[in-house]
Image (cartoon, rainbow, N blue to C red):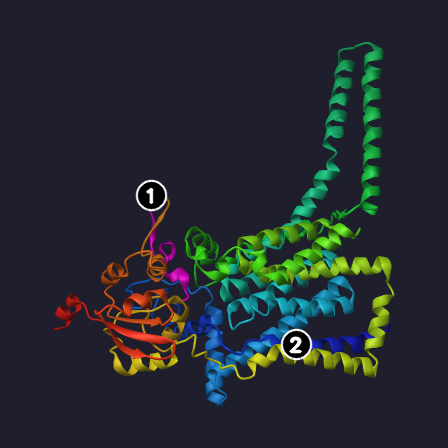
Amino acid sequence: MDKKTKMKFNVFAVFAIIIFCFAITPKTLQNDTYYTIKIGEHIMQNGIDMKDPFSWHENLPYTYPHWAYDVAIYQIFNLGESIGIGGFEAIYLSTVILTMILGVLLYYVAVKLCKNNLVAFFVTLGVMYLLKAFVAARAQLVTYIIFVLEILFIEQFLATKKKRYALGLIILPIIIANVHLAVWPFYFVLFMPYIAEYLLAIVTQLDWHYKIAIAWNKHRAKKLSMKKASKEKIEAATNCVNELQSKLEQSVMKREARREKPYRLILKKQDSVKWLIVIMIICAFTGLLTPLGDTPYTYLVKTMQGNTMDNINEHLPLTLINNKNILTVFALFLAILILTDTKITVRDFFMLAGLTLLCFMSRRQVSMFVIICGFIFQKLVNRLIDKYDKEGTEKVITTMTKFLPKVLGILIVVLVSAYLYKDKVNAAIVNKSSYPVEASEYIIENLDLDKIKLYNEYNYGSYLLYRGIPVFIDSRADLYAPEFNGKKGEDGKYKGRDIFTDYINISNLNVYYETKFEEYGFTHIIIRKGAKLNMFLSRNEKYKELYSDKNFVIYERTTEKIVEENS
């Protein structure tokens, strides 16, 4: 294919990907965005003090796990306010831009790695479609871009050994450690398949049983010679050595023949991987290049020791029956690998298997599976095409760069994008059915924020926090777990305030709510009308309804104890 045709197709592909990315970017902000703005503001005004300034609990330590992203979002919010487009609108615009960058980068890296523009284009659209549930104004969107760059730098470094890729691999984890340190350990996971393949190649080349037998018989022949044994015994030992060496040479030749024409698994031994190991070791120290101390090394471990991952939706195990899209993706992989003779490299097999396992452990990892395994899927499809119709994709690309097919292609992408975007046209930046907008106004105007102890639910705590209302809990789950606010005891368990578990038990009615309400000293409650707990509060005479709207209700808790203390 000539360069001009390829350039025309690339322009079409990038334009189509940008339109598609705009269509899938949600307009309504997600709950984490609200606390991100306030934390960024707090850092700009007070620095990183490692303390929580937003809940009414006293002396809760906070790790600021994505402080750099928080500051950036706050600055974007401020810029939007200052130029008159609105802070939330500016954040939405920044999310659109980051999504477009991710989409175009996925296409660029796919073309670099797979050398097939047509396959790269369609798979990139598929990947972005599968990612639409994960696109939000959160730090994870930046780390998706970084992980795509990591794969590019690793592959290019192994192929070219150029130092700029090695330098890039060292810079990227520094960014992650400051932008989203919760996923910092995952940076090293992506090195593992390359290293595992290299070690496997070394082990299979050892032919240790032949080499041990050769060494033993050489030693035996030498020993017999020193003892002046019979000529026949010495010759027998020598002949045994020669025979074993001949078998070793035949084994090497057979192995090389298998590698040239593998059955299914392609095993590569690239000596540059040993430098990749050195780079990874250097990267292990980049977690210290943050103002957060050793938090990048301890954050994920503490999170996994607690129970927050058992109760937050995105951390729960993947259920395929409830995720038809991912089920389809798994089926496509299996169809190619089982029903065709398409070959896969050992590194890609390890990557695919490892990320599949992580998917089933936590549905949050589906995003990383889709992004990274998207490149693997393209390689498999490309090998399939090369075997059966190598010229086919070039013909299609040439046809698509002509005027009418190009216009038709753009029209199809626009129509599909419009279909995906139609529900977002009238969507509000702040969803009033999910977040207590009017209820927050009531609290600010009618209650003394310095004296109340408000009970609120997890999913909208961040919005209350954004409005300056001290909260009982919000979506910074780690803040409310003993692994982060307590200390490790002699039994290896953390002793601290388990506010998160108390909230789960209260909201699920696993405990008598009045007991916990008394323990925390709640004075007011804001709750969704459809919550299970609200059925009891609405019938309890101790709870005076102060405010009610379509979605939320606010109660004042008027127990005798509180009345006596206030009088």
Identify which residue is drawn at 82% across, 9% down.
Answer: 230
Nearer-N-terminus badge (1/2): 2
Q: Residue furthest bottom?
A: 84
Q: Quadrant of residue 480?
A: bottom left
Instruction: Specify whether 288 is left or right of 461.
Output: right
Q: Quadrant of residue 417?
A: bottom right
Q: Nearer the viewer, residue 453 or 224?
A: 453
Q: Nearer the viewer, residue 173 or 142?
A: 142
Residue 177, image x and y in percent?
Answer: 51, 62
First to last magenta residue range: 475-489
**In the image, which disc is placed on residue 157?**
none
**In the image, which disc is placed on residue 490?**
1
Identify which residue is drawn at 73% across, 22% down.
Answer: 216
Q: CA gap, disc 1 to disc 2?
A: 54 Å
Instruction: Specify whether 68 is left or right of 482.
Output: right
Asked if residue 167 shows in the view, the reply is no
Identify which residue is drawn at 31% across, 57% down.
Answer: 497
Q: Secondary structure at mark 1?
A: loop
Q: Which residue is mark 2?
A: 20
Mark 1, Cα crowd under 10 Å, few <14 / some 14-19 / many 20+, is few
In the rendered image, residue 268 lying in the magenta stretch gets the answer no
- Residue type highlighted by circle 1: Glu
In the rendered image, residue 483 lying in the magenta stretch gets the answer yes
Asked if residue 427 shows in the view, the reply is yes
Instruction: Specify whether 506 is left or right of 242.
Output: left
Mark 2, Cα crowd under 10 Å, few <14 / some 14-19 / many 20+, is many
Q: Quadrant of residue 224?
A: top right
Are dots 1 and 2 in contact, CB under 8 Å?
Answer: no
Residue 248, image x and y in percent?
Answer: 81, 32
Residue 250, image x and y in percent?
Answer: 84, 34
